[in-house]
Image (cartoon, rainbow, N blue to C red):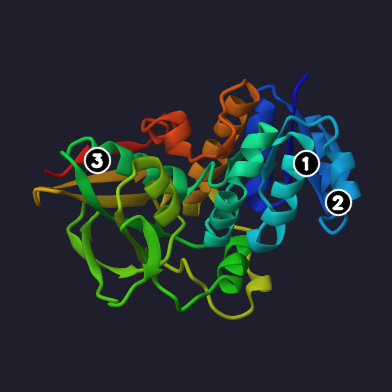
Amino acid sequence: MKKLMIYGAAGYTGSMTSELDHAAGLALVLAGRNAEPLSALAAQTQAEYRVFGLDNDAAIDKALSDVSVILNCAGPYMHTAGPLMHAAIRNGVHYLDIAAELDSYQLAEKLDEQAKAAGVMLLPGSGGSVAMLGCLAAHAIERVSEPRKISIALHVSGSMSRGSAVSASENLTTQLLIRSGGQLVTRTATVAGVFDFGAGPVSCCPVTLPDLITIGIATGVPDIETFVHVSGNAFPKGDLSALPAGPTIEERNANRYQAAVQVTGSNGMKVCSVLDTVNGYTFTPMAAAEAARRVLAGEYRPGFQTPAGLFGKGFAQTIADTRISDCN
């Protein structure tokens, strides 16, 4: 039987993803660096577990010897994506993760030809905002003849998990990038964007998101800029290790996420669309679990892929209560 390994399975998002894949009847291998939480989760999900770090290639290769797909849920991904992507290519294992860090996607681009030669797929961002924004952009560009520019924004609501907060703090950068003429370049102006997520126009900060890469690859649109609007205490300060593992079910239910996109065609015509969905910490494990299930069932293409490009623009709308509507 084909096996799915979830690395970082005992973490906040990893444990929810593991439970969902167990409920789907997949053959699971739970993995990570600490035995105690893994053994408890393994007992709960009736899965086997393996304990190994990422500083020993031989140990990683041994752990992957009978695995078909690995889903990396262990951040910060600047530390974990590299060893696991390289190991996946060495061992003929398809790689997925839930990263929101630009480095992971730049690495997947660099490893694209190696992955294709090995028949291995690299699918960073299989769940989370990359899946949301990619599907929204793919939907909107179909409404424009010769789309030339995409401006897209994510509304982050509610609190952040401890793991996400640590990853964000380690990946802080003052360099703002946009995609211009198909290339990533430094943004020369930091003017805020204005987007309507469904409750009126709000100001959004320009940020560097991995969607500059994934949307560019999936759509071929040459000019892309990304923004974020934050409400609640999504970016905490102070001692991040003291944060709870993640938002409670009640907190997640009270804070939905939205995304908005504006697409401009070569004739100057503009259209906008909005995605409304469940909280990101509810959406991400559901989307990642579904992506892993599909890949394990044989839905893959070798090389660097994106969720919207692989599964289609309707993928996000198959996850929980996700809707896309058009503004004009």
Which residue does the image show at 15% across and 38% down from the upper left? Answer: 145
Element at badge 2?
A: helix
On screen, 2 above or below 148? Answer: above
Please rate how many residues cluster around mark 3, counting C-alpha atoms within 10 Å: few if below 14, some from 14 to 19, many from 20: many
Q: Quadrant of residue 61?
A: top right
Coordinates of residue 130 in the picture (x, y in percent): 45, 48
Crowding at label 1, few (<14), some or many (≥20) Cα neighbours within 10 Å? some
Mark toward the viewer: 3 or 1: 1
Residue name at image x 50 percent, y 75 percent: 173
| Residue depicted at 38% across the width and 49% down the height | 216
Q: Is residue 20 left or right of residue 310?
A: right
Pointer 2: residues within 10 angstroms few (<14), some, or many (20+)? some
**Which one is in front in this view, the residue at disc 1 or the one at disc 2?**
1
Q: Residue at (46%, 66%) from the top-left corner?
A: 234
Q: Position of residue 36 (x, y in %)?
A: 87, 51
Question: Is 23 left, or right, of 99 in this rendering?
Answer: right
> Quarter of the image holding residue 196?
bottom left
Which residue is tagged 3?
141
Labels 3 and 1 touching (C-beta < 8 A): no
The local secondary structure at tag 3 comes to helix
- Residue 231 visible in this rendered orientation of the protein: no
Separation (CA) of disc 3 from disc 1: 37 Å
Name above or below for residue 114 compared with residue 268: above
The residue wearing badge 1 is 90
User: Of the residues under marks 3 and 2, which one precedes in the sequence?
Assistant: 2
